Image (tube, rainbow, N blue to C red):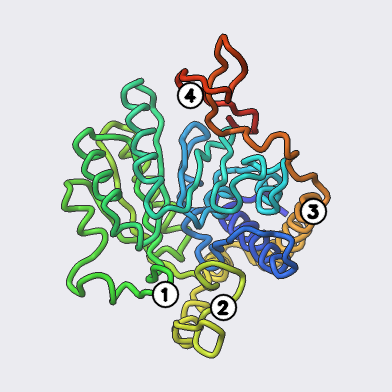
Amino acid sequence: MTPPTLRHRLVRDMVRVRCVEETLADAYRDQRMRTPVHFSIGQEAASVGVCAATRPTDVVYSGHRSHAPYLAKGGDLRAMVAELHGKRTGCAAGRGGSVHLVDHAAGFGGSAAILAEMIPVAVGAAWAFALDGEPRVALTFFGDGASEEGACHEALNFAQVRRLPVVFVCENNGYSIASPLSARQPADSSIRERARSYGMPARLVDGNDVFAVHDAARDAVEWCRTGRGPYFLELATYRWREHVGPGWDHDGEPRGYRPKAEVDGWLERCPVRRAADALRPEDAGIDGRIAAWTERFRDEARQAVAQAEADPFPDVRTLLDGAYAPAASADGPAGGGSCHEPQIAYSGRNQ
Protein backbone atom coordinates (compact mmCIF):
# COMPACT_ATOMS: atom_id res chain seq x y z
CA MET A 1 0.00 0.00 0.00
CA THR A 2 1.44 3.36 -0.99
CA PRO A 3 2.14 5.99 1.69
CA PRO A 4 -0.85 8.23 2.37
CA THR A 5 -1.01 11.59 0.67
CA LEU A 6 -2.21 14.74 2.42
CA ARG A 7 -5.74 13.90 1.30
CA HIS A 8 -5.40 10.45 2.86
CA ARG A 9 -4.05 11.95 6.08
CA LEU A 10 -7.05 14.24 6.33
CA VAL A 11 -9.39 11.25 6.10
CA ARG A 12 -7.25 9.24 8.53
CA ASP A 13 -7.29 12.03 11.10
CA MET A 14 -11.07 12.38 10.83
CA VAL A 15 -11.43 8.64 11.38
CA ARG A 16 -9.23 8.92 14.48
CA VAL A 17 -11.28 11.74 15.98
CA ARG A 18 -14.50 9.85 15.21
CA CYS A 19 -13.21 6.60 16.76
CA VAL A 20 -11.93 8.33 19.89
CA GLU A 21 -15.17 10.21 20.49
CA GLU A 22 -17.45 7.26 19.78
CA THR A 23 -15.39 5.13 22.18
CA LEU A 24 -15.64 7.84 24.82
CA ALA A 25 -19.38 8.18 24.24
CA ASP A 26 -19.81 4.45 24.83
CA ALA A 27 -17.62 4.51 27.95
CA TYR A 28 -19.32 7.62 29.31
CA ARG A 29 -22.45 5.68 30.16
CA ASP A 30 -20.47 3.67 32.74
CA GLN A 31 -20.33 6.82 34.92
CA ARG A 32 -16.56 6.64 35.41
CA MET A 33 -16.12 9.97 33.61
CA ARG A 34 -17.74 12.64 35.76
CA THR A 35 -17.21 15.59 33.47
CA PRO A 36 -19.60 17.16 30.96
CA VAL A 37 -18.61 16.11 27.44
CA HIS A 38 -19.36 17.96 24.21
CA PHE A 39 -18.70 15.69 21.24
CA SER A 40 -17.81 16.80 17.72
CA ILE A 41 -19.08 13.60 16.10
CA GLY A 42 -20.20 14.70 12.63
CA GLN A 43 -18.07 17.86 12.72
CA GLU A 44 -14.63 16.26 12.31
CA ALA A 45 -13.84 17.94 8.98
CA ALA A 46 -13.75 21.37 10.61
CA SER A 47 -10.98 20.73 13.11
CA VAL A 48 -8.99 18.32 10.97
CA GLY A 49 -9.11 20.49 7.86
CA VAL A 50 -8.13 23.66 9.71
CA CYS A 51 -5.41 22.24 11.95
CA ALA A 52 -3.75 20.47 9.02
CA ALA A 53 -3.10 23.92 7.54
CA THR A 54 -1.14 25.12 10.59
CA ARG A 55 2.49 24.88 11.59
CA PRO A 56 3.65 23.30 14.88
CA THR A 57 4.44 26.79 16.18
CA ASP A 58 0.91 28.08 15.54
CA VAL A 59 -1.44 28.00 18.52
CA VAL A 60 -5.05 26.81 18.62
CA TYR A 61 -7.70 27.72 21.19
CA SER A 62 -11.17 26.25 21.55
CA GLY A 63 -14.47 26.59 23.32
CA HIS A 64 -16.25 23.77 25.13
CA ARG A 65 -16.40 21.42 22.09
CA SER A 66 -12.69 20.85 22.42
CA HIS A 67 -11.78 17.19 21.81
CA ALA A 68 -11.57 17.43 18.03
CA PRO A 69 -9.34 20.54 17.75
CA TYR A 70 -7.14 19.21 20.57
CA LEU A 71 -6.59 15.91 18.77
CA ALA A 72 -6.33 17.49 15.31
CA LYS A 73 -3.55 19.80 16.57
CA GLY A 74 -1.64 16.81 17.93
CA GLY A 75 -2.71 16.82 21.58
CA ASP A 76 -1.75 13.82 23.71
CA LEU A 77 -4.67 11.36 23.59
CA ARG A 78 -3.89 9.58 26.85
CA ALA A 79 -3.56 12.88 28.71
CA MET A 80 -6.92 13.98 27.31
CA VAL A 81 -8.72 10.80 28.30
CA ALA A 82 -7.12 10.88 31.75
CA GLU A 83 -8.37 14.45 32.13
CA LEU A 84 -11.91 13.33 31.36
CA HIS A 85 -11.53 10.81 34.18
CA GLY A 86 -10.22 13.45 36.59
CA LYS A 87 -6.87 11.73 36.98
CA ARG A 88 -3.62 13.43 37.89
CA THR A 89 -2.08 12.22 34.62
CA GLY A 90 -4.59 14.38 32.75
CA CYS A 91 -3.49 17.26 30.59
CA ALA A 92 -4.79 19.70 33.25
CA ALA A 93 -3.76 17.45 36.16
CA GLY A 94 -7.32 16.18 36.51
CA ARG A 95 -8.68 19.58 37.50
CA GLY A 96 -10.38 20.80 34.35
CA GLY A 97 -12.24 17.96 32.70
CA SER A 98 -13.39 17.82 29.10
CA VAL A 99 -13.79 21.57 28.62
CA HIS A 100 -10.34 22.53 29.94
CA LEU A 101 -7.86 20.74 27.70
CA VAL A 102 -4.34 22.01 27.08
CA ASP A 103 -1.18 20.75 25.40
CA HIS A 104 1.36 23.51 24.89
CA ALA A 105 3.87 21.14 23.33
CA ALA A 106 1.39 20.40 20.53
CA GLY A 107 0.37 24.04 20.10
CA PHE A 108 -3.03 23.65 21.73
CA GLY A 109 -3.21 26.69 23.98
CA GLY A 110 -6.34 25.75 25.88
CA SER A 111 -10.11 25.50 25.94
CA ALA A 112 -12.82 26.79 28.25
CA ALA A 113 -16.56 26.47 28.75
CA ILE A 114 -17.63 30.11 29.08
CA LEU A 115 -19.15 31.12 25.76
CA ALA A 116 -16.65 33.11 23.62
CA GLU A 117 -14.10 33.16 26.45
CA MET A 118 -11.17 31.88 24.40
CA ILE A 119 -11.75 34.16 21.40
CA PRO A 120 -10.10 37.20 23.02
CA VAL A 121 -7.43 34.91 24.47
CA ALA A 122 -6.48 33.89 20.93
CA VAL A 123 -6.45 37.54 19.90
CA GLY A 124 -4.11 38.25 22.81
CA ALA A 125 -1.76 35.51 21.64
CA ALA A 126 -1.85 36.93 18.11
CA TRP A 127 -1.04 40.37 19.49
CA ALA A 128 2.00 38.91 21.27
CA PHE A 129 3.15 37.28 18.02
CA ALA A 130 2.80 40.59 16.19
CA LEU A 131 4.65 42.56 18.88
CA ASP A 132 7.47 40.02 18.91
CA GLY A 133 7.66 39.92 15.12
CA GLU A 134 7.14 36.15 15.09
CA PRO A 135 5.63 34.51 11.97
CA ARG A 136 3.08 32.62 14.06
CA VAL A 137 -0.70 32.48 13.80
CA ALA A 138 -3.33 32.02 16.50
CA LEU A 139 -6.58 30.23 15.67
CA THR A 140 -9.76 30.03 17.72
CA PHE A 141 -12.65 27.59 17.31
CA PHE A 142 -16.15 28.54 18.50
CA GLY A 143 -19.77 27.91 17.65
CA ASP A 144 -22.54 30.02 16.18
CA GLY A 145 -23.83 30.78 19.68
CA ALA A 146 -20.48 32.29 20.71
CA SER A 147 -20.56 34.54 17.64
CA GLU A 148 -23.41 36.44 19.31
CA GLU A 149 -21.41 37.31 22.43
CA GLY A 150 -20.03 40.80 22.98
CA ALA A 151 -16.58 39.39 23.70
CA CYS A 152 -16.50 37.94 20.19
CA HIS A 153 -17.25 41.27 18.55
CA GLU A 154 -14.80 43.16 20.74
CA ALA A 155 -12.14 40.62 19.72
CA LEU A 156 -13.01 40.91 16.02
CA ASN A 157 -12.80 44.68 16.17
CA PHE A 158 -9.52 44.75 18.09
CA ALA A 159 -7.92 42.14 15.81
CA GLN A 160 -8.80 44.16 12.72
CA VAL A 161 -7.69 47.49 14.22
CA ARG A 162 -4.31 45.95 15.10
CA ARG A 163 -4.16 43.74 11.99
CA LEU A 164 -3.37 40.70 14.10
CA PRO A 165 -2.53 37.21 12.79
CA VAL A 166 -5.60 35.37 14.08
CA VAL A 167 -7.99 33.05 12.25
CA PHE A 168 -11.53 33.02 13.65
CA VAL A 169 -13.12 29.61 12.98
CA CYS A 170 -16.86 29.55 13.56
CA GLU A 171 -18.26 26.00 13.49
CA ASN A 172 -21.83 26.88 12.63
CA ASN A 173 -23.82 23.77 13.52
CA GLY A 174 -27.10 25.67 13.58
CA TYR A 175 -27.82 25.38 17.30
CA SER A 176 -26.90 27.11 20.53
CA ILE A 177 -27.77 24.26 22.90
CA ALA A 178 -31.44 23.83 21.89
CA SER A 179 -32.03 27.16 20.15
CA PRO A 180 -31.84 27.04 16.35
CA LEU A 181 -30.11 29.82 14.48
CA SER A 182 -33.44 30.96 13.02
CA ALA A 183 -34.73 31.78 16.51
CA ARG A 184 -31.68 33.86 17.43
CA GLN A 185 -30.58 35.79 14.38
CA PRO A 186 -32.46 37.85 11.75
CA ALA A 187 -33.29 35.93 8.59
CA ASP A 188 -31.53 38.45 6.34
CA SER A 189 -28.23 38.38 8.24
CA SER A 190 -25.29 36.01 8.45
CA ILE A 191 -22.40 35.39 10.79
CA ARG A 192 -19.78 35.93 8.11
CA GLU A 193 -21.33 39.22 7.01
CA ARG A 194 -21.16 40.55 10.55
CA ALA A 195 -17.48 39.58 10.66
CA ARG A 196 -16.94 41.17 7.26
CA SER A 197 -18.41 44.42 8.57
CA TYR A 198 -15.23 44.89 10.61
CA GLY A 199 -13.21 44.96 7.41
CA MET A 200 -11.69 41.49 7.47
CA PRO A 201 -12.16 38.80 4.84
CA ALA A 202 -14.85 36.30 5.82
CA ARG A 203 -15.64 33.12 3.95
CA LEU A 204 -18.43 30.54 4.10
CA VAL A 205 -17.20 26.96 3.61
CA ASP A 206 -18.92 23.58 3.52
CA GLY A 207 -17.75 22.38 6.92
CA ASN A 208 -18.39 18.73 6.07
CA ASP A 209 -15.99 18.79 3.11
CA VAL A 210 -12.56 18.33 4.69
CA PHE A 211 -10.75 19.17 1.45
CA ALA A 212 -12.63 22.46 1.02
CA VAL A 213 -12.03 23.29 4.68
CA HIS A 214 -8.32 22.63 4.36
CA ASP A 215 -8.01 24.76 1.21
CA ALA A 216 -9.84 27.66 2.88
CA ALA A 217 -7.82 27.33 6.09
CA ARG A 218 -4.56 27.29 4.15
CA ASP A 219 -5.52 30.57 2.49
CA ALA A 220 -6.61 32.07 5.81
CA VAL A 221 -3.43 31.08 7.66
CA GLU A 222 -1.26 32.40 4.83
CA TRP A 223 -3.20 35.68 4.86
CA CYS A 224 -2.51 36.10 8.56
CA ARG A 225 1.10 34.96 8.45
CA THR A 226 1.99 37.52 5.80
CA GLY A 227 0.84 40.42 7.97
CA ARG A 228 -2.50 41.22 6.32
CA GLY A 229 -4.55 40.97 9.48
CA PRO A 230 -7.23 38.55 10.71
CA TYR A 231 -9.41 36.17 8.70
CA PHE A 232 -12.84 34.72 9.47
CA LEU A 233 -14.05 31.26 8.43
CA GLU A 234 -17.66 30.19 8.85
CA LEU A 235 -17.88 26.41 8.51
CA ALA A 236 -21.40 25.06 7.94
CA THR A 237 -21.62 21.73 9.78
CA TYR A 238 -23.78 19.75 12.21
CA ARG A 239 -23.26 17.83 15.43
CA TRP A 240 -24.83 14.40 15.47
CA ARG A 241 -25.08 13.93 19.24
CA GLU A 242 -26.77 16.04 21.89
CA HIS A 243 -25.27 19.38 22.91
CA VAL A 244 -23.65 17.88 26.00
CA GLY A 245 -23.51 14.13 26.58
CA PRO A 246 -23.33 10.93 24.56
CA GLY A 247 -26.99 10.63 23.58
CA TRP A 248 -29.19 11.96 20.81
CA ASP A 249 -31.58 14.91 21.00
CA HIS A 250 -33.95 14.50 18.08
CA ASP A 251 -37.69 14.07 18.48
CA GLY A 252 -38.61 10.67 19.84
CA GLU A 253 -35.68 10.81 22.29
CA PRO A 254 -35.70 12.20 25.84
CA ARG A 255 -35.15 15.97 25.73
CA GLY A 256 -35.48 15.79 21.95
CA TYR A 257 -35.87 19.08 20.13
CA ARG A 258 -34.39 18.55 16.67
CA PRO A 259 -36.45 16.93 13.90
CA LYS A 260 -35.18 13.41 13.26
CA ALA A 261 -35.45 14.02 9.52
CA GLU A 262 -33.05 16.94 9.92
CA VAL A 263 -30.55 14.79 11.84
CA ASP A 264 -30.85 11.97 9.31
CA GLY A 265 -30.22 14.41 6.47
CA TRP A 266 -26.95 15.48 8.04
CA LEU A 267 -25.97 11.88 8.76
CA GLU A 268 -26.09 11.37 5.01
CA ARG A 269 -23.56 14.20 4.66
CA CYS A 270 -21.04 12.40 6.89
CA PRO A 271 -17.64 14.07 6.34
CA VAL A 272 -15.75 10.77 6.45
CA ARG A 273 -18.02 9.14 3.89
CA ARG A 274 -17.91 12.18 1.62
CA ALA A 275 -14.12 12.28 1.71
CA ALA A 276 -13.93 8.56 0.96
CA ASP A 277 -16.27 8.99 -2.00
CA ALA A 278 -14.06 11.78 -3.33
CA LEU A 279 -10.90 9.67 -2.98
CA ARG A 280 -12.27 6.42 -4.39
CA PRO A 281 -11.65 7.30 -8.09
CA GLU A 282 -7.94 7.83 -7.36
CA ASP A 283 -7.61 5.10 -4.71
CA ALA A 284 -9.74 2.00 -5.06
CA GLY A 285 -8.38 0.80 -1.72
CA ILE A 286 -9.67 3.72 0.37
CA ASP A 287 -12.38 1.62 2.02
CA GLY A 288 -9.79 -0.91 3.13
CA ARG A 289 -7.65 1.89 4.54
CA ILE A 290 -10.58 3.30 6.50
CA ALA A 291 -11.43 -0.14 7.90
CA ALA A 292 -7.82 -0.60 9.05
CA TRP A 293 -7.67 2.88 10.54
CA THR A 294 -10.96 2.32 12.34
CA GLU A 295 -9.72 -0.89 13.96
CA ARG A 296 -6.41 0.74 14.91
CA PHE A 297 -7.89 3.88 16.40
CA ARG A 298 -10.68 2.14 18.27
CA ASP A 299 -8.06 -0.03 19.91
CA GLU A 300 -5.93 3.05 20.69
CA ALA A 301 -8.94 4.74 22.29
CA ARG A 302 -9.88 1.67 24.34
CA GLN A 303 -6.32 1.44 25.63
CA ALA A 304 -6.41 5.12 26.61
CA VAL A 305 -9.65 4.58 28.52
CA ALA A 306 -8.24 1.51 30.31
CA GLN A 307 -5.08 3.40 31.24
CA ALA A 308 -7.08 6.37 32.51
CA GLU A 309 -9.24 4.14 34.68
CA ALA A 310 -6.10 2.63 36.22
CA ASP A 311 -4.35 5.97 36.79
CA PRO A 312 -4.44 7.61 40.24
CA PHE A 313 -6.59 10.54 41.24
CA PRO A 314 -4.82 13.72 42.38
CA ASP A 315 -3.55 13.59 45.96
CA VAL A 316 -5.65 15.65 48.35
CA ARG A 317 -2.46 17.38 49.49
CA THR A 318 -2.28 19.06 46.07
CA LEU A 319 -5.77 20.51 46.45
CA LEU A 320 -4.56 24.12 46.42
CA ASP A 321 -2.03 23.69 43.62
CA GLY A 322 -2.92 26.17 40.93
CA ALA A 323 -4.74 28.44 43.36
CA TYR A 324 -3.63 31.85 44.55
CA ALA A 325 -2.27 31.88 48.10
CA PRO A 326 -0.85 34.64 50.28
CA ALA A 327 2.93 34.89 50.20
CA ALA A 328 4.76 33.87 53.35
CA SER A 329 5.68 36.76 55.63
CA ALA A 330 8.49 37.24 58.11
CA ASP A 331 6.01 36.49 60.89
CA GLY A 332 5.10 33.07 59.68
CA PRO A 333 3.93 30.83 56.83
CA ALA A 334 1.37 31.66 54.19
CA GLY A 335 -2.19 31.96 55.39
CA GLY A 336 -1.26 33.51 58.72
CA GLY A 337 -2.79 36.90 58.13
CA SER A 338 -0.09 38.18 55.79
CA CYS A 339 -0.93 41.35 53.88
CA HIS A 340 1.56 40.58 51.13
CA GLU A 341 0.44 40.49 47.49
CA PRO A 342 -0.81 37.03 46.47
CA GLN A 343 1.45 34.72 44.50
CA ILE A 344 0.50 31.77 42.38
CA ALA A 345 1.58 28.31 43.44
CA TYR A 346 1.24 25.74 40.70
CA SER A 347 2.92 22.41 40.28
CA GLY A 348 0.70 20.83 37.67
CA ARG A 349 1.41 19.72 34.10
CA ASN A 350 1.63 22.26 31.28
CA GLN A 351 2.25 25.25 33.51
Q: Secondary structure at mark 3?
A: helix
Residue at the image point whose x is 20% and y is 59% from the top:
193
The answer to whether residue 228 is above or below residue 306 is: above
Query: Does 90 sit left or right of 211 as displayed?
Result: right
Q: Which residue is denoted by mark 4 in the rendering? A: 342
Question: In terms of sequence position, does the residue under pointer 3 or pointer 1 come before the other?
Answer: 1
Question: In terms of sequence position, does the residue under pointer 2 or pointer 4 come before the other?
Answer: 2
Q: Quadrant of the N terminus?
A: bottom right
Q: Position of residue 269 (x, y in %)?
A: 49, 75
Question: In terms of sequence position, does the residue under pointer 3 or pointer 2 come before the other?
Answer: 2
Query: Residue most toward the bottom?
Result: 252
Q: Amino acid at mark 1?
A: Ala
Tell me the number on the disc at residue 248. 2
Q: Which residue is denoted by mark 1 in the rendering? A: 178
Query: Which residue is at the front of the view, 263 or 113?
Result: 113
Q: Position of residue 19 (x, y in %)?
A: 67, 62
Labels 3 & 2 near each other (Cβ < 8 A): no
Tell me the number on the disc at residue 158. none
